Amino acid sequence: MYNWSHIDEEAMKKEDPEKYRLWRLTQRINYGLDGEKLDREEVKAAWSAIKEDIEPYTRRAIEYVLWGTVYSLPTNLKWWMPYNSVTK
């Protein structure tokens, strides 16, 4: 995964390791793993903190894989709309 954001990862890692871990996990889920694998237990442990930042279709897939949860997305969700404006 190549991160296009202008975040200084090394500084974030030193200042707040937990925040960096959650940010990195969210980035990997949303933008690709680049050959890495996710740790199921790490995702489960961090899920309550990161689920609002995950794209809705990806969130639904992960919830299905981890917990077998099946539900429908909001009917007003369109592909061109930012997902945070609809889900909050």
Image: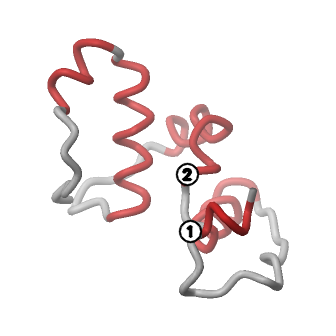
In the image, 44 versus 12, the foreground residue is 12
Identity, as a three-letter code, of the amino acid under mark 2: Asp
Identity, as a three-letter code, of the amino acid under mark 1: Thr
Question: Along the horizontal axis of the image, is 87 left or right of 4?
Answer: right
In the image, 83 versus 32, the foreground residue is 83
Q: Earlier in the sequence, mark 1 or mark 2?
A: 2
In the image, 36 versus 85, the foreground residue is 85
Badge 2 is on which residue? 53
In the image, 6 versus 18, the foreground residue is 6
Question: Along the horizontal axis of the image, is 32 left or right of 87?
Answer: left
Rendering quarter of residue 22: top left
Residue at horizontal 62%, vertical 41%? Answer: 47
Q: Are marks 1 and 2 in contact (CB under 8 Å)?
A: no
* Mark 2 element type: helix
Residue at horizontal 60%, vertical 32%? Answer: 45
Question: Along the horizontal axis of the image, is 44 left or right of 14?
Answer: right
Residue at horizontal 79%, vertical 83%? Answer: 76
Q: Position of residue 17 (x, y in %)?
A: 34, 18
Q: Position of residue 43 (x, y in %)?
A: 53, 42
Residue 37 vertical position relative to residue 43 in the rendered view, above or below: below
Residue at horizontal 61%, vertical 74%? Answer: 57
Residue 78 vertical position relative to residue 69 in the rendered view, above or below: below
Q: Residues within 10 Å of mark 1 (few under 14, many from 20)?
A: few
Q: Which mark is residue 48?
A: none
* Quarter containing the N terminus: bottom left
- The answer for how far apart the CA atoms under marks 1 and 2 are is 10 Å
Q: Position of residue 4 (x, y in %)?
A: 19, 57
Question: Along the horizontal axis of the image, is 17 left or right of 68?
Answer: left
Badge 1 is on which residue? 58
